[in-house]
């Protein structure tokens, strides 16, 4: 394994001092080290991966140096526009070092939502005409790879990618931990919220541990296992898009309440959807944000949720009612109000990060979830 300290120092020797990106579980140890050893202006946890590329572009324009953009390979989709129309050699020709976590590398077991991107990560880089190297696990070999990227920047001045396999980095524990002191963790809040919904209500849950915790709650409380998940669509991938899915459903099912179980990181990633809600005014749409101020599923790195007012954002975008809750009683009161009024409505539930170590994953496949959910909607 590579020591995060060693890799950070090696990059610094080659004048890489600016970082931007979206946390990834394969890169979490290195990202934690960067967080602990960089200033806020030199390390930006971006709203999405495309933003990170643009931030690095701005950094290069102002400094003349190449920045580092880190991401999970799933985030390559968010990068394609700026990589092809901003940094590309046929446009502005801007250098940056992509550090890409290779989830679902071919031949390795992973979750369904990662398999396609794992298979096409390298071919996609080839299609984008971005040269790349697989990051070695031997520290001595890493020097040569970094030097190869630097040499590329001196001649082509375009992006270069380092693809990072699972288990490449040694463990590092984040020191700059963002502490919160709310009464509930997310799983407790999800259990309370889900238990208050009616049998005919529809739920769309965001990617990561939110959907996993909702699934396990249904498993534990469903009288009929075959029917216990029927009202839930688990968005296992497509981070930041669960609210748009929920709106698409709400517009077609105006007589049923639709609840989006969202996260702060997912909301921030594609915040433009709030304006769509305000424009369309779906009266049956209820947006619940489980805000633990962290990218909890990929290492607990902080989001920008501490710097924004989610309720004011929702109001400014046309939500008719906005609420906040922290305790179990407050959650019960706010959801009761949401059930009795026309929306769109938003509830921010502030909770602590962290999850059970034995938290499972959905035992249904995405296709099974879709089939059961569509049967429920068809009734």
Image (spheres, grey):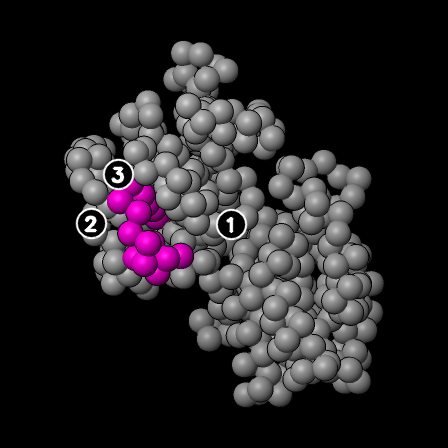
Above-or-below relation of 109 to 304: above
Tell me the residue that label 1 is attached to.
239
- The residue at the point 49 percent across, 68 percent down is 44
Q: Quadrant of residue 126?
A: bottom right
Residue 321 circle label: 2
Q: How far is the residue under mark 2 from the one under mark 3?
A: 24 Å
Tell me the residue that label 3 is attached to.
183
Point out the frontmost of discs 2 and 3: 2
Q: Specify whether 147 is left or right of 208.
A: right
Say which of 204 and 29 sits in front.
Answer: 204
Above-or-below relation of 81 to 184: below
Q: Earlier in the sequence, mark 1 or mark 3?
A: 3
Q: How far is the residue under mark 1 from the one under mark 3?
A: 27 Å
Dot 2 surroundings within 10 Å: few (below 14), some, or many (20 or more)?
some
Image location (x, y in percent) of residue 76: 64, 59
Q: Magenta residues? A: 273-292
Above-or-below relation of 367 to 57: above
């Amino acid at each position: 394994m590579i020591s995060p300290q060693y890799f950070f120092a090696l990059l610094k020797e080659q004048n890489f001092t600016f970082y931007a990106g979206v946390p990834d579980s394969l890169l979490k140890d290195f990202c934690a080290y960067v967080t602990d050893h960089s200033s806020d202006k030199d390390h930006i946890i971006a709203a999405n991966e495309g933003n990170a590329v643009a931030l690095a572009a701005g950094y290069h324009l102002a400094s003349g140096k190449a920045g580092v953009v880190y991401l999970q390979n799933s985030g390559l989709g968010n990068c394609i526009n700026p990589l092809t129309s901003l940094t590309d050699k046929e446009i502005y020709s801007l250098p940056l070092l992509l550090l890409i976590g290779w989830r679902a590398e071919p031949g390795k077991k992973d979750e369904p939502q990662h398999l396609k991107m794992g298979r096409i990560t390298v071919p996609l880089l080839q299609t984008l005409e971005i040269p790349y190297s697989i990051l070695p696990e031997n520290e001595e070999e890493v020097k040569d790879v970094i030097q190869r990227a630097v040499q590329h920047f001196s001649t082509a001045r375009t992006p270069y990618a380092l693809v990072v396999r699972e288990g490449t980095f040694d463990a590092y524990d984040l020191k700059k931990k963002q502490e919160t002191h709310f009464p509930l963790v997310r799983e407790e809040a999800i259990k309370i919220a889900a238990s208050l919904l009616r049998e005919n209500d529809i739920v769309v849950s965001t990617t990561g541990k939110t959907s996993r915790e909702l699934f396990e709650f249904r498993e534990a409380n469903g009288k009929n296992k075959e029917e216990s998940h029927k009202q839930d669509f688990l968005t296992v991938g497509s981070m930041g898009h669960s609210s748009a899915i929920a709106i698409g459903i709400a517009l077609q099912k105006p007589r049923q309440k639709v609840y989006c179980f969202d996260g702060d990181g997912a909301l921030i990633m594609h915040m433009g959807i709030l304006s769509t809600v305000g424009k369309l005014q779906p009266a049956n749409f209820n947006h619940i944000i489980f805000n633990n101020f962290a990218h909890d599923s990929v290492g607990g790195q902080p989001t920008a949720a501490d710097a924004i007012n989610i309720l004011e954002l929702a109001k400014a975008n046309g939500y008719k009612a906005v609420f906040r809750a922290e305790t179990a009683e407050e959650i019960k009161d706010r959801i009761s109000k949401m059930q009795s009024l026309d929306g769109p409505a938003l509830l921010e539930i502030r909770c602590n990060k962290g999850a059970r170590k034995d938290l499972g994953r959905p035992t249904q496949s995405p296709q099974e979830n879709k089939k059961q959910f569509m049967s429920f909607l068809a009734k």
